[in-house]
Amino acid sequence: MPAKTPPINPLRPAIAGLALLLAFPSAGMTQNSSEKEKGKTSVPSTTTPSGEPHQTTKDSEKTITTNHGVPISDDQNSLKAGVRGPTLLEDFILREKISHFDHERIPERVVHARGTGAHGYFQAYKSQSDITKAAFLQDPEVKTEVFVRFSTVAGGAGSGDTPRDVRGFAVKFYTTDGNYDLVGNNIPVFFIQDAMKFPDLVHAVKMEPDRGFPQAASAHDTFWDFASLTPEINHMLMWVMSDRAIPRSYRMMEGFGVHTFRLVDAKGTSRFVKFHWRPKLGTQSLLWDEAVKIYGADPDFHRRDLWDAISSGNFPEWELGLQVFDEETAAKLPFDVLDATKLIPEELVPLRMVGRLVLNRNVDNFFAETEQVAFLPTNIVPGIEFTNDPLLQGRLFSYQDTQLTRLGGPNFHQIPVNAPKGCPMGFGNNNQRDGLHQMAVPKGRVAYEPQSLDKNPPRENPVAGFASVPEVMDGAKERKRSETFADHYSQARQFFQSMTEPEQRHIISAFAFELSKVETKAIRLRMMGHLANIDSKLHDGVAEALGMKEKEPAVEPGVPARDLPPSPPLSLLAKAPKTMEGRKIGVLVTDGFDGALLKELRDTARAEKAGLMVIAPKVGGVTDADGKTVEADLSLSAAPSIFFDSVAVLSSKAGAEDLAGQAAAVDWVRDAFGHLKVLGHTEEAQSVLEKAGIRADDGVVKIAAGKTASAYFTAARAGRIWAREPALRRPG
Ligand code: HDE
C-alpha cells in the first residue's frame, strides 16, 4: 500500500474502487506480479462506484466502439503509464471521446435560439385546386408529414420559456413536391417594414453588449430607445405588450405567416394569401405575474407541456386558415399588403379553413432534430410564391446564409430532419456536388449540363417544375420606403380598441412595467408621445401607472391615425372557448381528506379531457379518511399553483390547520386566487383560505360530496375570474 492515499470520492469509479480495496484488500484485485513486487495496487477497470462489475458484452453487435468502429474494452479509465501515472497521448479512445464532446455545441440561432419541436402531419379538408396547385393541398386522403418548431425570439438557447416575447411557429411540410417551410410567428404583424432594420432591431432587444444583460427581456433601455425612434413598430408593440406575448401553452396559441404570399393555381392565376393557424383548444394566455413565477419554477414550462401532451396521446391540433384575395381587393384596402406591420381584418377578408395540423410524435433526439432543423422561407413549392414585401425579400437571403454558419456548410439539407421525404429525389436530384459534410455518394462522371455522356440525367420539367409568376416589374432603382407604408398608428389604435377591458388593462400594465425599467427618462417620454397618437385611454393609463409628472413632447405622426372599426377576432378573450379540454387542475390533499371527492373530480376531469394532478405536502402521498394511501404526483414545494389552470384544496380540518402554518401552502392558495383561478375547497379547508386572505366570489367554489364536480367544473370551464382582477392589481 502506498503511504499516501488520495481522498475518497464515490463519484469517481477508479477511486471508489480504491476505497473498496482499502476496506477489503483482497477484493477484486487484478494486480500483476510486477506491480505486486513494487508494492503498488491497481483497481479493476470495470467496477461501478459500489464495486460491482460494469456490465460488459460478448455480442459484437452491442460492443461499444470508437467513431471509426474500433471495439472498446474499457470505457471507464484512460490509458496511463502506471495506475497513478500520467495519461498517455497515445490514448486515441480518450482523445476521440473528449474531442467529440468539445465540439458538441453548434452556434445557437441568432434569434429564436430557444425552441422545441415535434413531428406530425397536415391533412387538407378538401382539394384547394381552385386557388393553388400546391401538392399538399389537393387530396384530402393524403397526410403530409410535418416538423414544427416553436420558439421564443430574444433569449438564448438556455433561457426560459415564458418571457414576454413573440413566439416562432415554424412548420416544415415534407410535400411530394419538396419541402415547403411556413416560417411564421404567433403574432400576425412584425416590428419593422424593411429587412435592412432587422439586425438593428435584434441588437436592440438582445442583451446589451457591454453588460451582457438582460437576458430574454425587452424591458431595457436599448429596446425602448430603438422602439421610440422607429414609429413603424407601434402596431407590433400593441401585440407584444398584450397577452399574446405570454401564451399559456404552445398548444393554445395562434400562428401566422405574417407576410402576404401568393397562391398560384394550375392555370397560372395568382392570388394573394395570408396564412393563419388556429389552435383546436382555443387561445389562452398567462398573467404576467404567473409568467414571471413560472420562469423560475419551471423554465421548461412550454417545452414540457408540449412533450407531455404528445406523449400522453393528447395530440395538439391547429386548423390552417387562408385569407385569399385578388389584386383588386388588395388595391382597395386602406393599407399596403406588402407592409408586414399591417394585417387584414377578418371582417374584410374572412378565413377559409383548409385543413388541420396534428402533432403526434415527440422527437427522438433534441439535437439531431430540433436543434439541427433548418427552416428556410425559400423552401417553397409549385403553387405558392413570394411577394415583394421588403421584409420577406430580406428573409429570402438570411435563412440559407445563417445555416452555413450554424450547420457548418452547404450540405445541411442532407441532415435527416431537413432532407425532403415526400419526393422521389431524396437529397435533391441535380449536378451540385461536394462541400463539407457531403453524405451522399453521387455516381458517374457527369456533374454538368448540357452534356451527352449520361443517358439518364436529371432534366428540367417545364410542366411540373417551379416557375415564377411573370409579375411585371417597373421602377427606378432607389433606396426608399413606399408612401403607402406611412400610417403607423391606425392599426395600433384599432388593436387596442378591439381588446376587452381586462386585455386593455394588461397592455397598460405591460407598457408601464417595461417603461419603468427604462433608466433614461428621455426614452420613456419619447415613447409616451407615440402612445398619445394611438389612444388616449392607453396613454393616460400608462402615464398614471408610471406616475409621470411631466408632459411628454408630442410626436408628429407622418400620417395621423384613422379610426377603424374594432375587429373582435383580434381579442383573445372575446373568442376564448369555455372548456376544460387540455387544461390542468391541481388538487391539494392532506392526510384524512375525503378520497371520494378526489375520485369525483378525477372522473369528471377525465370526461372533460382535462389533466388532474394530486399535490401533497410530501411526494410520498397521504392517507385518506378511509385509511387508503393516495399517491401524490408532486409535492407542494415542487408544484406551485402557477402550474395549473384551476385548483382545489381537499383537506381535512387538521390538514388545513397544518397547511395554514406552511408558507408554501398559503402561497399556493393566495397565488391561485391572485391569478384569478377558480379555487375549489372543502368546508374543512377554510382555515388555510382564511390565512391566505381569500374573499368569496364566483370563482371560490365549495366542494361537497355529491355535487362536487358540476359546480366546480362549470366555474372552471369559463377560465379566469376577470371580475376579481381590478380589486387585486393596479397597472404599474
Ligand atoms: Fe426570422 N430568422 N428573420 N422572422 N425567424 C431566423 O434563421 C430573419 C422574421 C422566424 O424554429 C434565423 O435559422 C430576418 C419574420 C422563425 O428554426 C435568421 C428577418 C418572421 C424563426 C432569421 C426575419 C420570422 C426565425 C435565425 C427580417 C415571422 C425560427 C436562425 C428580414 C414571419 C425558425 C435561423 C426555427 C429564425 C432572419 C424576420 C420568423 C437569422 C433577416 C417577419 C419562426 O436567419
Image (cartoon, rainbow, N blue to C red):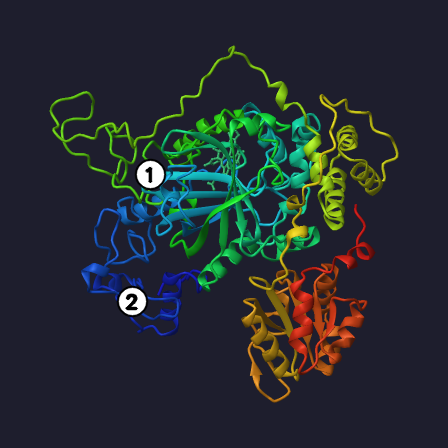
Q: Between 438 and 143, which is closer to the camera in this rendering?
A: 143
Instruction: State left or right for residue 728 relative to residue 385.
Output: right
Amino acid type indicated by mark 1:
Gly
Amino acid type indicated by mark 2:
Gln
Q: Between 311 and 83, which is closer to the camera in this rendering?
A: 311
Residue at the disc numbered 1: 178
Compare marks 1 and 2 and give the one earlier in the sequence.
2
In the rendered image, the residue lying farthest to the top is: 476
Residue 391 locus on image (x, y percent): 53, 27
Mark number displayed over residue 55 = 2
Instruction: State left or right for residue 472 relative to residue 489.
Output: left
Local crowd size for mark 1, using a 10 Å CA cut-off: few (<14), some (14–19), many (≥20): many
Residue 101 locus on image (x, y percent): 38, 46
Image quadrant occupied by the N terminus: bottom left
Residue at 19% over, 65% down: 58
Q: CA distance from mark 1 to mark 2?
A: 46 Å
Dividing the picture into quarters, in which one does residue 444 lie? top left
Image quadrant occupied by the C terminus: top right
Relative vertical location of residue 713 with respect to residue 530 in this rendering, above or below: below
Secondary element type, mark 1: strand
Residue at 56% over, 63% down: 581
> Within 8 Å: ligand 1 and the Cβ of disc 1?
no
Residue 48 locus on image (x, y percent): 36, 66
